[in-house]
Image: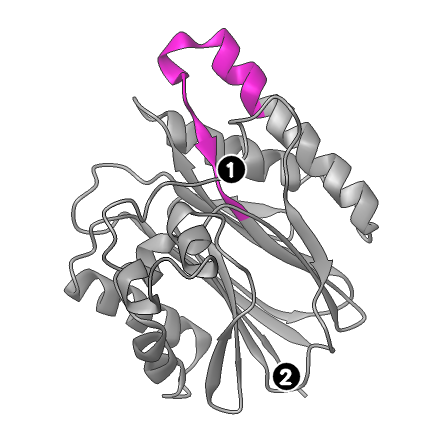
Amino acid sequence: MYEIYGLTDVGCVREHNEDGFLIQKARKNQGELHLENVEGTWIAAVADGMGGQAAGEVASELALKHLEKLELPISSEELMSYLNQINDEILAYGSKNKEAKGLGTTLTGMICNDHQLTLFHIGDSRLYRFRDGFLKQISQDHSLVEALFQQGEISREEKSRHPKRHILLRSLGTTTNGVKADVESVRGRFESGDLFLLCSDGLNDSLTDEEIERVLGQDQSLENTAHALIQSAKQAGGEDNITVVMVRRHP
């Protein structure tokens, strides 16, 4: 049995929200959504759009709108093909609407089938697992600073303040040669008591992993925890839109 809670907020600086999230067949680009007693196969995802003149908002909406039509369960190969269809859909929109030139979006999510998780990820939105009081990042950012870190050119501390930290190496809608998304089964099963967190970079740009871990460790309801995370991010500046989707498995 699963409980899933999603919340998105425009933050303290932006005029509109380019983030969005999907839980099952419901997508939101404002407000919250709470599903309890979820059984069987399910999907949850977060998208963070980019582009001028509200094009980012369009890109994230297109990605989630396409994703909500996905029939589950699905193989990894079929999912990769589907992500390429989403990429083509966003590219087509950009080619027909010159004001939306340069639009694109991240997309990070998970599909659960028989307590086994499949991750799909492109961009720098994130998937974390919180288990036994410890937070672990499951996804790996497709960003310039992450590449520099993996190559040993910058330290972990330098990643958070690097002037090019928002440059993405991969996203949906920005390549005509097919997307290079991460699609993989997460090792192990979704254990009773586990909590998974999907978020846009508006959260982890404002809060360190240690700060996120402390909020999750307060063991509140998912609703209260989500609001606490977003409030903490806004108190730290809230310069970007902030979206969280949290999933907990109950016994």
* Residue depth check, mark 2 versus mark 1: number of the one nearer the observer: 1
Residue found 73% across the figure and 36% down from its top: 82
Look at label 2 and name its amino acid: His
Mark carried by residue 250: 2
Measured as percent of width and height from the top left, residue 37 is found at 65, 73
Image quarter of the C terminus: bottom right
Residue at the (70%, 68%) spot, across then down: 186
Q: Quadrant of residue 88?
A: top right
In the picture, measured across the screen, residue 216 lies left or right of residue 129, that is: left
Question: Which residue is rendered at x = 75% and y = 73% of the image?
Answer: 115
Residue matched to label 1: 171
Membership of 102 in magenta stretch: yes
User: Residue 107: where, in percent of width, then height?
Assistant: 54, 45
Type of amino acid under label 1: Ser
- The residue segment tinted magenta is 90-107
Q: Could you tell me which residue is drawn at 36 percent across and 73 percent down?
A: 209
The structure's colour scheme is one colour
Q: Is 72 on the left or on the right of 194, as rendered? A: right
Closer to the camera, 80 or 74?
A: 80
The disc at residue 95 is: none
Q: Residues within 10 Å of mark 2 (few under 14, many from 20)?
A: few
Q: Residues within 10 Å of mark 1 (few under 14, many from 20)?
A: many
Query: Could you say which is closer to the camera, residue 156 or residue 108?
Result: 156
Q: Is residue 101 left or right of residue 198?
A: left
